[in-house]
Image (spheres, helix red, strand yellow):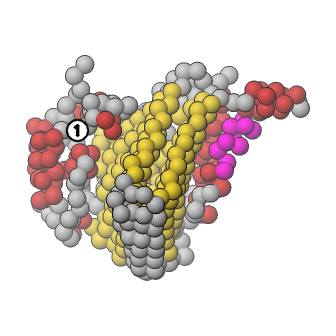
Amino acid sequence: MKPSSLSIEHLRKFVHSLPNDALTETREAALANIDEHGLPSVRDEDWKYTDLDDAIQISNRWLAEQPTVASTDSLRELVATTISSIDANWLVVESGVVDISRFDASVDLEVERFSDTAAPFVMDRPLADLNAALLHDGLRIRVNAATEKPLGLLIIDGAATDASVSQASIEIEVAPGCDAEIIEYQTSIGDGDHYGNSVIALQIDQAATANYVRIQDRQLHHVQTGRLSITLGQDSRLNMASFDLGGRLIRNDVDIDLCEPGAEATFNGLYLAGDGQHIDNHSRVDHRVGPASSSQEYRGILNGRCRCVWNGKAIVHKGADGTDANQANHNLLLSDKAEIDAKPELEIYADDVKCSHGTTVGQLDEAALFYLRSRGLDKRRATQILVHAFAVDLIARTPIKATRDKITALVEARLANLIQETE
């Protein structure tokens, strides 16, 4: 079957309807790139497990209507509920529209809109081109000093119509020697079909530390693609945790560039998938110099007819002696209809390195289940204990304390639904 194609005619018409501002030149360049190269398909190696047909069809329906953006009472209520659940200083991107009204401008953070300043972001990926072409506005943030509260980035979408699409683009710089806590929270509401596409770039300067937590809790029939690009300076640190709970089709790309000696990146992920879900995590770490270290661990809990993908790649470039790179992926399958495609990759072009990778796929330990049931627990409670134990370690390692209660509640609620599907 021939892959679906994005309607360039409708895309061009929409791009030309957007305001003439500092983003105009960027939009036109992105439009030209899409016209020339198109969007990824399963014929591309990095996309062979994930078909973007749903995202393209939603986009074509939305573009054909030449839509306008409108907030709803239910969306505004979800915004208020979400930001009140985590104590942070929030910037909101609501259905692609930047809202800084809740942001405390007295803290030592610089915030600019792309539409007010030049936007020289690099579009080197097709979905980043789509993001730039359709972007209403974006945010550029510089963290100059440690703040009392984490910086919260709420990317929230409403799907009240038949089809809707939104874009979010954010650039963040953590100044030299600074410690920063950053929360990315993506969620959605509404019965209509929705496709959200985000591009976030994080630059961690010399001797700076960034603790980053990403939460994805979209409606189970919505689609999301996201790219997070992170550059680490000399002696800088990244501590990151990701949690994927919702969405019908989710694709996360994380690119980490260790371009200066002494940099350390630790990132973990937990994905929970049930009937009808497809969650794809792709990570790439470029070790360009040494010594530097990276460590990633992703865990998945799958039930029903679902499919997940984990592709972790570490590239040790020539001259990056002293590199320490580790990858791990572990999956728990609660159903014989669940599928996981796990692909760890190491490319090593230096000699003095320490690298490892591994992946496991298994089911609940029958002996452990029998033991718990012999102590008076029913099957559901015994399953709940074992599944929770598999996930709780990653939750405990979440680097921002302010998020742990919310993450625990979200994970436990999603796990309860997954376990119910086994009955």
Which quarter of the figure is the N terminus placed in? top left
- As drawn, is 382 to the left or to the right of 198? right
Residue under the image location 34 percent in, 59 percent down: 318
Which region shows up in magenta? 384-393
- 50 relative to 265, above or below: above
Residue under the image location 54 percent in, 25 percent down: 338
Residue under the image location 32 percent in, 54 percent down: 199
Residue 50, x across and y down, in percent: 36, 33
**Dot 1: few (<14), some (14–19), or many (≥20) neighbours within 10 Å?**
many
Q: Secondary structure at mark 1?
A: loop
- As drawn, is 406 to the left or to the right of 116? right
Q: Locate residue 60: give its quadrant.
A: top left
Residue 57, x across and y down, in percent: 26, 30
Q: Is residue 187 visible?
A: no
Residue under the image location 54 percent in, 21 percent down: 337
- As drawn, is 199 to the left or to the right of 64? right
- 153 relative to 362, above or below: below
Which quarter of the figure is the C terminus placed in? top right
Q: Is residue 1 visible?
A: yes
Residue 206 on the magenta segment: no
Query: Among all residues in the image, which is located at the extreme right?
Result: 375
Q: Determine which residue is flagged by label 1.
A: 39
Q: Foreground: 156 or 422?
A: 422
Q: Foreground: 309 or 13?
A: 309
- As drawn, is 349 to the left or to the right of 122? right
- 67 relative to 104, above or below: above
Query: Among all residues in the image, which is located at the extreme front?
Result: 351
Residue 88, x across and y down, in percent: 52, 66
Q: Foreground: 279 or 207?
A: 207
- Amino acid type of the residue tagged 1 in the rendering: Leu
Residue 65, x across and y down, in percent: 20, 36
